[in-house]
Image (cartoon, grey):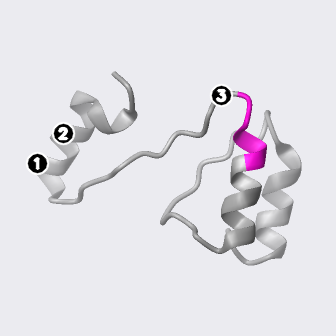
Amino acid sequence: MTSYTDTEWNRVMFEKTGVKVNFLHPVFGQEKEQLNVMIASGDLTDMIRVLSSNIPEEWSRLMRTGLF
């Protein structure tokens, strides 16, 4: 598996809902930088999952800017 997009769970969910979910995974170790680039560029995905244990300050910033 190279992405959660390739999981059996995602395939079954698509069959049941008709909603195709494509997962984008940041390069390991560059999560914070890649999130900052996404936010700064305004090129946002429909959903963003940030692990608060890894970058807790991002949650408050996303909420302040209205992106979350």
The image quarter containing residue 62 is bottom right
The first of marks 3 and 2 along the sequence is 2
Q: CA distance from mark 1 to mark 2?
A: 6 Å
The answer to whether the residue labelled 1 contacts the one labelled 3, judged by CB atoms less than 8 Å apart, is no
Q: Residue furthest bottom?
A: 66
Q: Residues within 10 Å of mark 1 (few under 14, many from 20)?
A: few
Quadrant where the image shows the C terminus: bottom right
Tell me the number on the disc at residue 55: none
Tell me the number on the disc at residue 28: 3
Give the amino acid at mark 1: Glu
The answer to whether the residue labelled 3 contacts the one labelled 2, judged by CB atoms less than 8 Å apart, is no
Asked if residue 31 lies in the magenta stretch, the reply is: yes
Q: Main secondary structure of the magenta part?
A: helix
Give the amino acid at mark 3: Phe
Q: Residue furthest top?
A: 1
The image quarter containing residue 2 is top left
Asked if residue 1 lies in the magenta stretch, the reply is: no
Q: CA distance from mark 1 to mark 3?
A: 30 Å
Determine whether, in the image, residue 22 is placed left or right of residue 24: left
Nearest-to-viewer mark from 1 and 3: 3
Residue 31 vertical position relative to residue 67 in the rendered view, above or below:
above
Q: Residues within 10 Å of mark 3 (few under 14, many from 20)?
A: few
Query: Which residue corresponds to mark 1?
Result: 15
What's the residue at 32%, 52% (across, down)?
Answer: 21
Task: Report the front residue among 58 and 35.
Answer: 35
What's the residue at 62%, 34% (across, down)?
Answer: 27
Give the amino acid at mark 2: Arg
The answer to whether the residue labelled 1 contacts the one labelled 2, judged by CB atoms less than 8 Å apart, is yes
Quadrant where the image shows the N terminus: top left
Q: Position of residue 24 (x, y in %)?
A: 47, 46
Tell me the number on the disc at residue 11: 2
Q: Residues within 10 Å of mark 2 (few under 14, many from 20)?
A: some
